[in-house]
Image: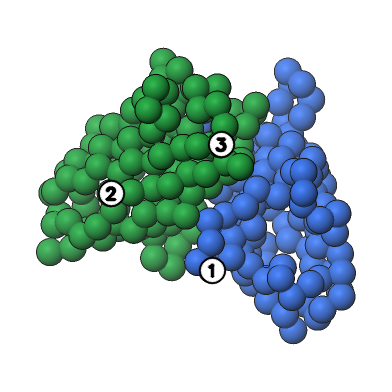
Amino acid sequence: DIVMTQSPDSLAVSLGERATINCKSSQSVLATSNNKNNLTWYQHKPGQPPKLLIYWASTRKSGVPDRFSGSGSGTDFTLTITSLQAEDVAVYYCQQFYALPFTFGQGTKLEIK
Amino acid sequence: QVQLVESGGGLVKPGGSLRLSCAASGFTFSDYDMYWIRQAPGKGLEWISYIYRIGTAIYYADSVEGRFTLSKDNDKKSLNLQMDSLRVEDSAVYFCASGSEVRGVFEYWGQGALVTVSS
């Protein structure tokens, strides 16, 4: 199984500042068939279902604010939230869809400082 | 708009069974893969099952293989998860999710159904 490891486990950032969450996979999730990284990012707020933010490591889902961006390739990925807003408080998960079983990182809890 | 509504959760004793259903609307159900993902109390997300759009391929996580059975009724726009031989560690909120054009991307999620396995 591909193990996904996020860092940090929790993060406190001031409003308007940048938040950076890292995700590392135990093996490359870059698909040679289309040269795309099979990685997604989800936002999970308490009492709500998770919400897809980004897929192919850097493609923002329609409707997701452009302060959310994804980057990285191979085994190392980053979710960046520029200019943090109060509504961004949530747990963020990376997930690989390169191979079954699909696996998630342990989650990163983002709070306001 | 896409709606996924889970039902069938509840309290069950270890070794018992439950059947979760997910009613879909707002999209062409037969065109999309479907998934179940769960979250145990205080834990992260765990993918547990996936069914191909026309039901010809089904996959399970090792943690539920042989105990859970997934089915998809495209006529009724319903996704069903039969859970047998339940264990305490199966206690979780179970989310159904719809796929996108990309296998393994969980585009839309239901609100979840709580399953508690306890004696």
Q: Is residue B87 above or below residue B76?
A: below
Circle nearer the viewer, 3 or 2: 3
In this rendered view, identify the residue nearer to me: B1 or A33.
B1
In this rendered view, identify the residue nearer to me: B73 or A24.
B73
Secondary structure state at the residue bearing disc 3: loop
Q: State which quadrant residue A65 falls in.
A: bottom right
Work out which quarter of the rendered image holds the C terminus of chain A and state it: bottom right
Q: Chain of mark 2?
A: B
In this rendered view, identify the residue nearer to me: B47 or A15.
A15
Q: What's the amino acid at mark 3?
A: Gly
Residue at image coords 25%, 37%: B82
Q: CA distance from mark 3 to mark 2?
A: 21 Å
Q: Which residue is mark 1?
A: A46
Q: Tag on residue B26?
A: 3
Q: State which quadrant residue B70 falls in.
A: top left
Tint applied to chain A in the drawing = blue
Q: CA distance from mark 1 to mark 2?
A: 22 Å
Question: Measured from the top left, where is residue A9 in percent x and y?
Answer: 62, 68
Q: Chain of mark 1?
A: A
Q: Which residue is mark 2?
A: B8
Tint applied to chain B in the drawing = green
Which label's residue is closer to the chain start, 3 or 2?
2
Secondary structure state at the residue bearing disc 1: loop
Q: What's the amino acid at mark 2?
A: Gly
Q: Tag on residue B44?
A: none
